[in-house]
Structures are given as C-alpha cells and as structure tokens.
Amino acid sequence: MADNAGSTSSTERTSLADSSIFDSKVTETSKENLFVGSTSYVEEEMPQIETRVILVQEAGKQEELIKALKEIKVPFVKMASVEEFESLDSPEFENVFIVMNFQDAVFNELYKNDCRVIGPPVVLNCAQKGEPLPFSCRPLYCTSMMNLTLCFTGFRKKEELIAVSLGTPIMKPEWIYKAWERRNEQDFCASVDDFRNDFKVPPFQDCILSFLGFSDEEKTNMEEMTEMQGGNYLPVGDERCTHLVVEENIVKELPFEPSKKLYVVKQEWFWGSIQMDARAGETMYLYEKANTPELKKSVSLLSLNTPNSNRKRRRLKETLAQLSRETDMSPFPPQTPKSCTKSSKNSTPVPSKQSARWQVAKELYQTESNYVNILATIIQLFQVPLEEEGQRGGPILAPEEIKTIFGSIPDIFDVHTKIKDDLEDLIVNWDESKSIGDIFLKYSKDLVKTYPPFVNFFEMSKETIIKCEKQKPRFHAFLKINQAKPECGRQSLVELLIRPVQRLPSVALLLNDLKKHTAEENPDKSTLEKAIGSLKEVMTHINEDKRKTEAQKQIFDVVYEVDGCPANLLSSHRSLVQRVETISLGEHPCDRGEQVTLFLFNDCLEIARKRHKVIGTFRSPHGHTRPPASLKHIHLMPLSQIKKVLDIRETEDCHNAFALLVRPPTEQANVLLSFQMTSEELPKENWLKMLCRHVANTICKADAENLMYTADPESFEVNTKDMDSTLSRASRAIKKTSKKVTRAFSFSKTPKRALRRALMASQSSVEGRSPSSNEKHVMSRLSSTSSLAGIPSPSLVSLPSFFERRSHTLSRSTTHLI
C-alpha cells in the first residue's frame, strides 16, 4: 500500500504541474525547459488536475528529499513496490515519480508505461532556487544540462553519438559521460567553461591542411596553430589534404586543379575557426579566382617613338597631373578660397592660385579626418566586438584586459571628431582671416585630459596585446581576421594604437608650418603660437620615459654627419627608421649622378648629398674629436608632402630605381624626385613598403599599399644607364668642378665677360705688364664684393667652403639645445 505521507492541505497546495497532461497531449514538441504553472487559460475548457509526487522505494526514505517537497508545497506519497502502481493511478492526479536509480527494473517499468520520472537532484535544485518542477516528457534525472539544446552527428552507431551544441564548440562523448558521473552534485552544471573546456573537440580534428601564398614566418605560425588545434599539415598538392588555405591577396591562380573532395578556403576560415573554437563552415569562405586585373596599380606606358622632346615633356606633365588628381585625398569637393576669388554681379567666381596657408590648412584637415577614421576603426573593429556579450565560444578577453588595451581611445575619438568637424567647417567656408589656432585652443583642456593616460600606459597596452596573443589562440585569430580587412590596411592592432602617440607631435609640426605661411598682420599668427604652446603643454604631461634615449642618439649622429642639418630635426618624439644610399637620377633634389643619402624618420625625410670637399676634423668645446661632416643638407621634407611612391620596373636600362611624387605647400604642381638605390643590404621592395607605411602613418591613412604605384621607366623618363661608367663619372666630375667655379663668383653676379677680363688682368700682372683701366675696374669690383660684413676675403678656391661653414643652420659646435 502506498504511504500517504504528504498531508498538505488543499488550500496550501499549489498547482505547479496542473497543465502537464494537457501540454503533453497537445504540444509534445515542447519537451525541455517548460515549467508547470497556472492553467487559468484552460480552466473553463477542462477540469483542473493536481500534480502529485510519488516517492518510489528508496526515495521515500530520503529525509532531505521529503523536506524539499514540503518547501515547494507539492503533495507526495510513497510507493514501496511496482505492484502498488495500479492503485495509485488516478485521473484526478498527474503523477510524477521520483526514482533513485535510473538503471534498475522499477525505472524500466515506469518508463515503459510512459510515466513522468525525475531524479532527486531535480527536486533538490528546485527547492534551493524556489522554482517549480520542470516538465519533461522524457525521464529527467538532474538539471546540469538545463537550457542546452544538443544535436548529435557524426556517428555510425547510436551509442557513439557526439554532442554538438548549436552556436557553441563541438564536444567529445566523454563530456556527457563525465557529466552523468557528477549527476548527484546539486550545484554542478555541465555547461560551465571550467568543466566543458576539457572535452571540446579541437576545430581541426581529423583535418589535414596545407597553406599557399604565405611567407615562411606566417606559414610556420599557422602550421604550429594547426597542430595546437588538433589538426595536421602537409605540403601543397598532397592528395591526403582535406583543406587548402589560400592567402587571397597574394594568390591569383592556383598552381594545380583541386580535387572535388579538397576544400580551397580563404585564410579567414582558418582564423575564424580558431576564434570561435569550432570548425567553421567551408562554404562561406571558399576561395574564388579573381577575374580582376592585378591589384597593384600601374601607370600606363607612354610611347617611346616620340621624336619631339617637347611632346615627351608634355606627356610627362600629363602623367604627373593624372597622378596628382589620383592623390587628392580631400573627402569633399575642392573649394575656392574666398580670398582667392574675383566676383562680380554678372560673373562667376574664378579661382586663382591657392595660398600656401590654404594648402597647409587643407593638409591639416585631411590628416585629422584620416586620424578620426583610424580611431573609429580601432573602436568598431576591435574594441566593440571584444566587449560584446554572448560571444560564440565565450569572451575572448577579460574586461580588465580590454580596458588595459584600449584605455581612453573612445575619449580621444570624441575630442578629435569635434576638432575635425570644426576644421571641415573652416575649410569649406575658407577665408584667410579665419583662425585655426582657436580650434585647438578650444579643445586644449580635453586633450590634456585624454592623451596622457593613454600615451603613458601605451607600453602596458602593447605588452598586454603581445601576452594575450601568445596565451590565447582565439585572440590571436581575432587579430589575424581583422588585420586582413581593408579598413586596417593590413596593420596590426599595435600599429594602429600607436597613432595617438604620434598624432600630437604631427599636429604641432603642421601648426608650425601653418604659422610660417601666415602673414604677420593676420591675427591667427599669435593664436597659432598659443595653440602650439598648448600642445606642448599636453606633451609635457607625458612621462619622460617615453623619450627614447637610443633614438635621440641616432638623431644627434645624423646632425653631426650632415652639414647644415636643420635644428628642428631634433625632437623628443622623432626616431630614425632607416638610412638608404642612392644616386639622383633627375634634376631634383640635386644634379643627376650626385650621391644622395636619405634618412627616413617616423615623420620626415632628410635628404643630403655627399660633400664635394671635406675640410679637416672637428673638436667640440669639451675636447671630443669628431670626424668632419661627409654630407651636405639639401632638404628636410615632411612625409605628408609625399603623395605617391613610384616603384620603377626593372628593365635593361633601369635597375633598382624608384621615385617620389612630392607636393610642397608652396608649389602648385607636383615635383618628381627619382633615385637609384646603391646599397644591397636592403631590398628595394622592403624599402618602399617601409616608406609607404610611415607616410601613411603621418597622414593617418590605413591603406599604405595605395600610396605605391608600379611605373614604367619610360613614363617618367627615368633610367640608370651609364650611371657607373667611367665616362659618366668623368662627365659628372667636370660638371661639378665648373659649378664650383661658377658659385665662387656667383655672389657678385659678375658677367662672364668681366670674369674673363679679370683673369686676363691677373695673368698680365704675372707676366709683368700693368693691367688696363677696365681690368683694374673689374679687379676692384671683385675685391669689394668678396668681403662679408668686414671679414677679409678668403682665397678664390676656399670661398665656397667658407660660405658653407658660415651658413650652417645648426652649428657643428653645438652640444646642447636650450
């Protein structure tokens, strides 16, 4: 007989499962996660059915279980044997049987009769949380997999099924078995990461991968990651491979016809699988052969059969003009400055020559707009996805790691968005009298508030990225996926995050340039001075340890090596990147054949030529002897003036050549500087990519690759023919010597005829005859004009060197800058 142990009154009883029978008959598809509750919506259609719990055999002896049933106010009875089942079967009750062991004969009998069976952990868990008993048409022993929807696939035998959670990583069969072993633990949950991670199926289990189009370093890294994620790898073309991972930006055509069973996928499939910790579907990432022409832009070949040199010059000019149009970065239609227009009632404004101040102001706006886009990319492509809740596979990074990496980037973005909007309004409605300095003074307090916290902790941010990338494969994959996107320009997160560190010094340089091209009577002259001072104040809040001692030493070495090097090259935020030895191939920046050294800094390019004559050694005031300057300063060029980098194709008459398309603010047209690299240590391709990267950083553009053009040498009349021949060297030496003599007399602007007479007079005095009156006049004129501020004239031969020494922008005896 059943023991009526549950003496709960009808007024105390709750209809926790009154709708269970109705629900099971009407909607059997709702099998999990349905809780029994109020059935007011069916009370009028069918009589109310009360839920009753039946404790089977050993379950009736569990005091803890009985106490839990009383807490949730469910009536219960005890059943000592299966024979009592029929006597307890009543249409007035929905019986729920509690069985201690789901593997004995009693359980099998109840299951065969389609009874609702639950285990003791279900009751204990509901009592602890104050929840009603859950409804399930299948036997439910515990709730450790509550709210999980499982799919079983990949098995030939039913007992070998594997659990695959939709939207979560694939699990091994051991996960279910181990969870069953812990079924009696009341607080256990099979879905917690600490337990589940031990049974995840690696993304590349049973996969054999090969890699095409990657560098040796990238390939090695991806092969290591493949093994870490449960896969294997083989060389490209091996028939045993299941997947061929292709670098779609490099590979334009496969070297073989792939078999039907081989998946040919983009690299995003590889990194995406690692990021979500499960093998991604291949159909979304299939590699398709590109039908478009080569992505690297090429300048069209000009005709070589043009007999007229003027036509060649005209075509060269047209080519440069075409490049000029393509390099215009302005995001808005070109505006005509008000001060540069002439208008009348019956005529439309006609633009005149744009001022240098306008050119620098436009460049300031363009770089600011690009910088804001970079910050937006950092936030939208990296920070927001990492902070997003419900990430597939769980959070990639902890909240404190995200905060350390990105810091005050959102605040910096907000400030510069306002600055960009104000600059845009000023440029669109341009007037020479409008103040640019006021814009930066307006936001100076915001800059002081936002920049130091980020810049001072940038090294910590960088170290956190490196550490997490090494320790967390999913984060490494996340970075790889985003780095390949066009918004990033194939730059890493660290390279993008260094932009705020470089931005304020770049703005200060542009404001200095703007001040230089602002008239004295313009009120903005003094305002710009204040704005520059405010930026310097922001930079003083940045820790002194940001100043790199070794980098500063390299800059001082350049200053001492280059005669006439500008003093403003020295900056705490500037560092030397690369030195390249070249030969000039055109008329700019110096004569063809001159040996030119290019010093690439992070924000500018110092151009120096080899000195024609080196004089003595130099001793500093402290007694340190330094070698004489071997180079002569030509030009210090901000990288923002470089509009295009031309990679000149290799031909029979042109080797290792490149060119720079430059637009100084004082010029209305682009200037072409062409060079031939002479150093073999650095490949030309690496040098040009390095140069493009730093130009892009300076103008705050992510797509550095778009700065480079591949050009035919004939298009720009560039060739290296006879650069190293004896005849060519002799010709250049004669040309240099003649220029020296010309420069020696250039200060008095003496005509050639007068110079000839002076030499004749000098010769006649040597021969013993007296010079004529005309000869005396010329000699007197030369004597009077060969002195400077009362300084006796040096000899004719040493005159050019004298002026070189006297006209240094930065004295070589300078050891400290105040």
Image: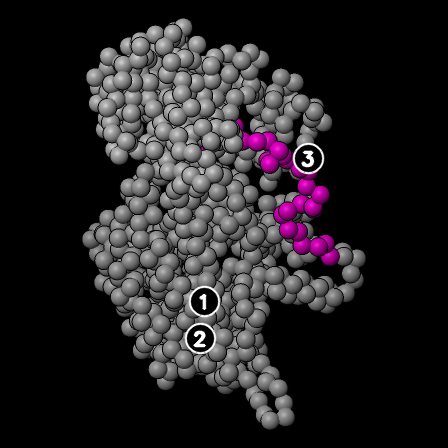
Name the N-terminal-most of marks 3 and 1.
3
Residue toward you, 516 or 100? 100
Magenta range: 276-302
Question: Mark on residue 325?
Answer: none
Residue 442, percent from left and from top: 31, 71
User: Residue under circle 2?
Assistant: 426
Please name the amino acid that badge 3 sits on.
Glu
Determine whether the residue tagged by mark 3 lies in a helix, strand or loop: loop
Please name the amino acid that badge 2 sits on.
Leu
Residue 782, percent from left and from top: 45, 78
CA separation, marks 2 and 3?
A: 49 Å
Residue toward you, 780 or 163? 163
Residue 609, percent from left and from top: 47, 56
CA separation, marks 3 and 1?
A: 41 Å
Name which residue lies at 44% across and 9% down.
Answer: 109
Mark 3 Cα-neighbour bin, 10 Å: few <14, some 14–19, many ≥20: few
The answer to whether mark 2 and mark 3 are in CB contact below 8 A is: no
Answer whether residue 227 is visible to the viewer in this image.
no
The answer to whether mark 1 and mark 2 are in CB contact below 8 A is: yes
Residue toward you, 586 or 493? 493
The part of the image, by quadrant, that contains residue 21 is top left
CA separation, marks 1 and 2?
A: 9 Å
Please indicate whether residue 587 sits to the left or right of residue 192 in the image.
right
Please name the amino acid that badge 1 sits on.
Tyr
Answer whether residue 533 is visible to the viewer in this image.
yes
User: Residue under circle 3?
Assistant: 253
In the image, residue 525 sits, relative to residue 177, either above or below, namely: below
Name the N-terminal-most of marks 2 and 3.
3
User: Residue under circle 1?
Assistant: 365
Colouring mode (rainbow / by chain / secondary structure / one colour): one colour
Tell me, yes or no, whether the highlighted magenta stretch contains residue 301.
yes
Quadrant, the C terminus = bottom left
